[in-house]
């Protein structure tokens, strides 16, 4: 059987309408797929409770606030309709207390179970009250805050008046002049720092190049120092050997002379008969021997050599 376009349009429209109703009910907090029952509560003050606010039992949500309105036109009391899961049975004397969800999250209804006997029937009216902590907070906290706020506003007004007296056109002009001077000074300091930075960079570059040169030629410098030490040692040893050789030759000639004198040969031998002269010569020889021994033992004491000149 062929379905006409009009039927298709009607079915589509009906489905859209049903989906819109379900979505609207869901946004209001109603679960259309779950069976609920209504209870009524009369309040003197709901403290900001709104429709779709949660209804809880021991912190677990069992329903929502279906509707809030005035009980009648003269009493000022408010009638709230609570939509609650029908599986929850409420004992007699259960209280529907309005309390904050959190500091910034609005209000909710907390069902505080009574002790009975018996249970409320669907559609009964529950006892309602506003949580005492809300009223205490309003009276003890908000009122002092408002009073302090008025005092702060008065002080701010006084400060604003004082500031307006200070901020004269002349004062503002002086501030602008100081700002311009600071800007000029800062620019000069920046230029000075930039120039010195260039000089410092150049100096560091030169030091780095010199250091690199020393590092690259460190082997050559060590060879030069080693050769200089070798030359110095060779020269020192050569001069010392020459000196010792000359002293040895002198000692041998002196020994020969003394032997001749001791034998009485020549004119000088005749002086050996003089005991005083003999003693003096003998003392001289002894002193010379001591000198030669000291030269052999301490050559540096008598011979000094330096690569950069004699001391």
Image: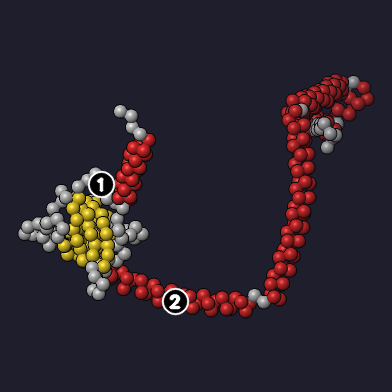
Question: Is residue 100 among what the camera can see?
Answer: no
Q: Is residue 34 above or below residue 268?
A: below
The residue that mark 1 highlights is 32
Residue 242 in the image: state x and y as whole percent. Answer: 84, 23
Q: Earlier in the sequence, mark 2 or mark 1?
A: 1
Q: CA distance from mark 2 to mark 1?
A: 50 Å
Residue 48 placement (x, y as % from top left): 31, 64
Which residue lies at the image location 76% right of the left edge and 28% below the top edge? Answer: 217
Residue at 25%, 54% (x, y): give it: 64
Q: Residues within 10 Å of mark 2 (few under 14, many from 20)?
A: few
Question: In terms of secondary structure, where does tag 1 sit?
Answer: loop
Residue 210, image x, y percentages:
77, 35
72 and 149: which is toward the camera: 72
Image location of residue 32, percent across then percent down = 25, 46
The residue carrying mark 2 is: 150
Q: Nearer the viewer, residue 239 or 123?
A: 123
Identity of the residue furthest to the right in this view: 267
Q: Is residue 269 rendered to the left or right of residue 205? A: right
Between 143 and 224, the residue placed more toward the observer is 143
Residue shown at 89% from the left, 29% from the top: 271
Residue 4 quadrant: top left
Residue contact between numbered discs 2 and 1, judged by CB atoms under 8 Å:
no
Dividing the picture into quadrants, the one containing residue 185 is bottom right
Numbered disc 2: secondary structure:
helix
Q: Which one is in front, 213 or 84?
A: 84
Q: Is residue 95 above or below residue 271?
A: below
């Amino acid at each position: 059987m062929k379905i006409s376009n009009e039927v298709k349009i009607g079915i589509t429209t009906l489905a859209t309408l049903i989906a819109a109703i379900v979505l609207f009910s869901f946004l209001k907090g109603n679960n259309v797929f779950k069976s609920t029952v209504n209870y009524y509560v009369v309040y003197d003050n709901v403290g900001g409770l709104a429709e779709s606010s949660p209804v809880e039992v021991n912190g677990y949500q069992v329903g929502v606030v279906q509707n809030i309105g005035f009980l009648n036109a003269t009493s000022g009391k408010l009638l709230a309709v609570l939509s609650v899961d029908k599986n929850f049975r409420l004992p007699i004397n259960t209280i529907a207390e309005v309390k904050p969800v959190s500091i910034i999250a609005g209000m909710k209804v907390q069902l505080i179970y009574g002790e009975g006997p018996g249970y409320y029937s669907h559609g009964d009216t529950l006892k309602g009250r506003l949580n005492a902590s809300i009223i205490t907070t309003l009276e003890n906290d908000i009122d002092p805050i408002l009073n302090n706020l008025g005092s702060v506003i008065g002080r701010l007004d006084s400060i604003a008046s004082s500031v307006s007296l200070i901020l004269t056109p002349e004062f503002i002009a002086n501030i602008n002049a100081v700002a311009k001077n600071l800007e000029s000074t800062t620019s000069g300091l920046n230029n000075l720092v930039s120039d010195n930075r260039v000089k410092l960079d150049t100096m560091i570059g030169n030091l780095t190049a010199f250091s690199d040169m020393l590092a690259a030629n460190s082997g050559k410098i060590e060879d030069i120092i080693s050769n200089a030490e070798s030359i110095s040692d060779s020269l020192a040893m050569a001069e010392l050997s020459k000196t010792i050789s000359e002293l040895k030759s002198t000692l041998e000639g002196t020994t020969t002379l003394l032997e001749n004198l001791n034998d009485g040969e020549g004119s000088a031998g005749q002086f050996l008969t003089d005991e005083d002269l003999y003693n003096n010569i003998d003392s001289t020889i002894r002193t010379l021997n001591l000198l030669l021994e000291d030269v052999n033992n301490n050559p540096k004491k008598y011979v000094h050599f330096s690569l950069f000149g004699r001391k």
